[in-house]
């Protein structure tokens, strides 16, 4: 059986021969010995070769980031990171590395230019492990609650989230776009399956260049038949609590390596989220020093101020109709507002989810499509869903990269994504 560093660093293996594969970091060559750290997905372990004991010409040639197999005797060593050390007895080199370009203190642009190599760093590895737990948690939550996973196309004929962020592409002799959201298709599929979800990339030609926008991001979306705004809010809260709880259980080592203060993550699991109307959120923003009027849209800067002192997420509900896309259901009690919610993450991070209840009658839908300056003929199939047995239904979309950014408390969404796509970056 293949063993990893985490499997052998225990009393049971002390004094025995262990075999490990990995990459070399922190290599130190002395007159009489060579020390280096061997790194695999599970951690690091110190390896040493004393020249007087056994001659290894290969050891002397080793360089940082070379890939090797080592066999040697495991012993405890309180001075070594992790508390163990291997005395090398056999060595096989898979690939001898050229001088590695990444050193301490590089600037962000250089690091992202070398993302393919930087991936190996322990910090990036820790973030990607947490990201993996987040994706696992999403699937686990929906499967556990009886949802079907179902997909929509990435090539589409029209917008969901407004024309300004549509990526236009040549689709043979026609214009087409990359999907901004699976939602419109979900509203068709929900009529047969009733509880559905997907995890897929969405695309936005965002030119805003903020710390929280990618042009391609991972979108976890759900749609539920016969559910209203309150129901969908409870589902959102359940999902986020489940994910954060999983990360706290499975990723203690990674959160520690990232020096993440876990107080707020624990709060999120244990306490109810806040709920406020859009107007109360504007009041809160103004109490914190902003000067917003009712009707103002909330962007990254405003949400940073609103959420920076919170210690649980906040549901901002019932926005003015003109701030939201055509598919949101106007509140029957006040049609100037829609039955929607944005879930804002604490610690300044802001929106991680957008969702709500959908328009379920044909006339309102056509009116709202026209009000947005769109052509109802482009949405014929979507309007059909209101012609043949419309039902109340709700859904939401979670920006998974944004959630990872907040859980890891990263300064920019690019750090949360393996190979980020932004207006300026499509390499590597
Ligand atoms: O709020 P949005 O635009 O809502 C929708 O797309 C709905 N159709 C979803 C639905 O109801 N099925 O996007 C949902 C979430 C946002 O809250 C945000 O977290 C994330 O997707 N998001 C982005 N993440 C990274 N980069 C971008 N450019 C993003 N745009 C949206
Ligand atoms: Mg939104």
Image (spheres, rainbow, N blue to C red):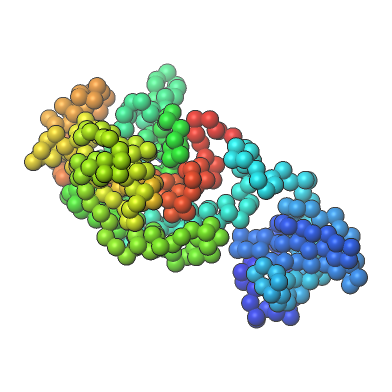
Relative vertical location of residue 371 with respect to residue 189 in this rendering, above or below? above
- Regarding residue 365, the answer to whether it shows in the image is yes
Q: Position of residue 104 (x, y in %)?
A: 67, 48
Relative vertical location of residue 162 with respect to residue 236 in this rendering, above or below? above
Q: Position of residue 319 (x, y in %)?
A: 21, 39
| Picture residue at 40% right of the left edge, 20% below the top | 174
| Picture residue at 62% right of the left edge, 40% below the top | 107
Q: Position of residue 236 (x, y in %)?
A: 29, 53
Q: Quadrant of ligand 1?
A: top left
Quadrant housing residue 273: bottom left
Q: Position of residue 358 (x, y in %)?
A: 20, 40
- Regarding residue 352, the answer to whether it shows in the image is no
| Picture residue at 44% right of the left edge, 67% below the top | 249
Image-based side of 89 in relation to 387, left or right: right
Relative vertical location of residue 161 with respect to residue 117 in this rendering, above or below? above
- In the image, 288 versus 175, the foreground residue is 288
């Amino acid at each position: 059986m293949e063993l990893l560093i985490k499997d052998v660093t225990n009393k049971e293996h002390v004094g025995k021969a262990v075999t490990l594969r990995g990459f070399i970091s922190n290599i130190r060559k002395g007159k009489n010995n060579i020390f280096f750290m061997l790194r695999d997905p599970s951690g690091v372990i110190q390896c040493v070769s004393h020249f007087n004991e056994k001659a290894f010409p290969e050891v002397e040639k080793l360089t940082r980031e070379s890939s090797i197999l080592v066999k040697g005797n495991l012993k405890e060593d309180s001075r070594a990171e992790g508390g163990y050390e291997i005395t090398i007895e056999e060595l096989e080199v898979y690939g001898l590395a050229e001088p590695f370009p990444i050193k301490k203190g590089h600037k962000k642009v250089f690091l992202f230019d070398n993302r393919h190599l930087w991936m190996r760093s322990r910090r990036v590895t820790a973030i990607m492990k947490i990201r993996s737990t987040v994706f696992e948690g999403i699937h686990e939550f929906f499967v556990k609650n009886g949802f079907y996973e179902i997909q929509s196309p990435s090539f589409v004929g029209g917008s969901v989230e407004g024309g300004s962020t549509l990526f236009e592409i040549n689709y043979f002799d026609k214009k087409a776009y990359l999907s901004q959201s699976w939602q419109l298709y979900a509203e068709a599929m929900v009529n047969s399956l009733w509880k559905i979800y997907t995890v897929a990339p969405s695309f936005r030609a965002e030119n805003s260049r903020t710390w929280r926008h990618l042009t391609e991001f991972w979108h976890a979306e759900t749609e539920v038949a016969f559910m209203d705004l309150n129901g969908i809010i409870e589902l959102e809260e359940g999902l986020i609590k489940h994910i954060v709880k999983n990360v706290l259980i499975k990723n203690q080592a990674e959160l520690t390596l990232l020096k993440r203060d876990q107080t707020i993550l624990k709060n999120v699991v244990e306490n109810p989220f806040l709920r406020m109307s859009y107007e109360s959120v504007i009041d809160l923003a103004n109490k914190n020093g902003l000067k917003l009027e009712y009707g103002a849209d909330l962007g990254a800067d405003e949400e940073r101020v609103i959420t920076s002192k919170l210690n649980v997420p906040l549901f901002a509900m019932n926005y003015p109709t003109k701030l939201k896309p055509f598919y949101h259901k106007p509140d029957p009690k006040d049609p100037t507002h829609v039955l929607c919610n944005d879930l804002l993450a604490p610690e300044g991070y802001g929106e991680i989810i957008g969702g709500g209840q959908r328009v379920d009658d044909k006339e309102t839908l056509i009116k709202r499509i026209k009000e947005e300056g769109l052509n109802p003929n482009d949405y014929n199939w979507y309007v059909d869903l209101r012609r043949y047995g419309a039902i109340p239904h709700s859904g939401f979309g979670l920006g998974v990269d944004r959630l990872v950014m907040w859980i890891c408390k990263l300064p920019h969404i690019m750090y949360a994504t393996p190979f980020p796509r932004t207006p300026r970056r499509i390499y590597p």
